[in-house]
Image (spheres, rainbow, N blue to C red):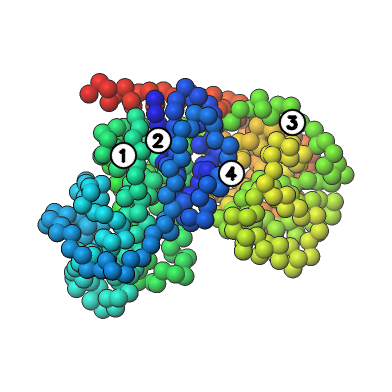
Amino acid sequence: MKICIIAEGSYPYITGGVSSWIQTVLTNMPEHEFIIYSIGAEKKAKGKFKYQLPSNVSHVEEVFLDDFTEEADKWGRDYKLSYKEKKALKSLLDSRQPDWETLLSMFSSDRIDSAVNFLKSKDFFDIVHEICLEKYDQLPFTDMFWSMRSMVLPLFICIKHPLPQADLYHSVSTGYAGVLGSLGKFMYHKPFLLTEHGIYTREREEEIIKAQWVKGYFKDLWIQYFYNMSTCAYDTADKVITLFQKNMEIQEELGCPSSKISIIPNGVNDEDYLLLTSKDTLNQDKLNIGAIVRVVPIKDIKTMLQSFAIVKQELPNSAFYIMGPTEEDEEYYHECLQLVENLQLDDVIFTGEVNVHEYIHKMDVLVLSSISEGQPLVLLEGMACGKPFVATDVGNCKGILLGERDDLGQAGIIVPVMQYVEMAKAIIQLCKDDHKRESMGAIGRERVRHFYTKMSFIDQYKQLYKDLVESIWQE
């Protein structure tokens, strides 16, 4: 079976999270051939893979959202769109119910030679002008035109980039990846599977609300556009997989038919962590607090550091290890280093990218301070190693640590987002109570062993792939 996994902003350029999940799928299904269709933000990342690709990955198709050239002599071309095509394009820009079938048909044809040329065409200009006259006559037309153009350009670049043929298309988010999964089904009449780790549209909505580069009156336009892309994936997918109950409810709220949705939680191989039990030689005389995390804003490293400033006053013999890559957002990393200096913190160690197995068992308490998450693998890894967590109340963190499928008890403490005082109190509470740390660690290990195993997660996806492809053969 040839499976095309479509990833956006993750594998194979970024470690952890969704990327780690994809690598687990690839390495545990050697019987299948995989093609990776990877959507990246910037072309400078081309070929710079963070993972050793397994032998069953036959090809990586890379497309970058900044991969276009301006051709000054192509303005004003007439593509002679039909009335239906013009209406469909207008629906994408100015509707809650875009005609995706017509749009996919139009952009997968040879008539549209390039995304950039089309967005300089008379057709696109006329449609934006019509929308402005109908709804935005108080706004400068130039602002509206360039905003709409920049909004749809990345999507059109993706659609016009060659999509490899496969037996099944598997997108690991909605957004651009979700539309491309829909395109694979449309062009090649193959099954389309969608796995949503976090809720893509909600994450983009938060970003746009905070963004300085989107003017206030355009924010609603951008937010609705991302919701429209998710609708495309939900409507087209043969099956939609989410990781936990709360996300399933949000997907239903956003319009995904409940009959399509199934829950398959993440999983880890608990046996990999059974022998990782001692602190070894890492600061045996200190209380070691750790975070296995990429140093990027959404992980909110600054709240961790502010909380540790309080912890350090109460527990001078503590050390804080931030274990993960720092180069993804170098500006943010340097802001974190500056905060360490401003807080006059000692014993804060940024390790850079490390082998998690070499560090995780040496920690006394693990911390996760993210602003947004799905079902974090790092929680399951730490629990498999018998380590208690302090984590923010995002995604499925509360369900994992407090137990939504059992009555085993607490495997950690949940705190509000961006509340460093509450986080510090929870860390101090665990650091001062050896019995509580050991008890929560044991509960976490037991919960992973019963409900979050890699074997269960892989077996369910193997069966899902088989069922979807066989359903096409039988038609």
Q: Position of residue 453 (x, y in %)?
A: 56, 27
Can see residue 451? no
Instruction: Check whether the beta carbons of the residues at disc 1 and disc 2 lie within 8 A of each other.
Output: yes
Residue 70 versus residue 296 in the image, above or below: below
Mark 3 or mark 2: whose residue is earlier in sequence: 2
| Local secondary structure at mark 2 | strand
Mark 4 surroundings within 10 Å by alpha-carbon count, few (fewer than 14), some (14 through 19), many (20 or more): few
Disc 1 and disc 2: Cα gap in Å?
9 Å
First of labels 1, 2 by sequence position:
2
Q: Which mark is residue 4?
A: 2
Identify the amino acid type marked 3.
Answer: Leu
Q: Are marks 3 and 2 in contact (CB under 8 Å)?
A: no
Gap between marks 3 and 1 measured at Cα: 43 Å
> Which of the 4 image quarters holds residue 300?
bottom right
Pointer 4 residue: 50
Observer-side mark, 3 or 1, equals: 1
Q: Residues within 10 Å of mark 2 (few under 14, many from 20)?
A: many
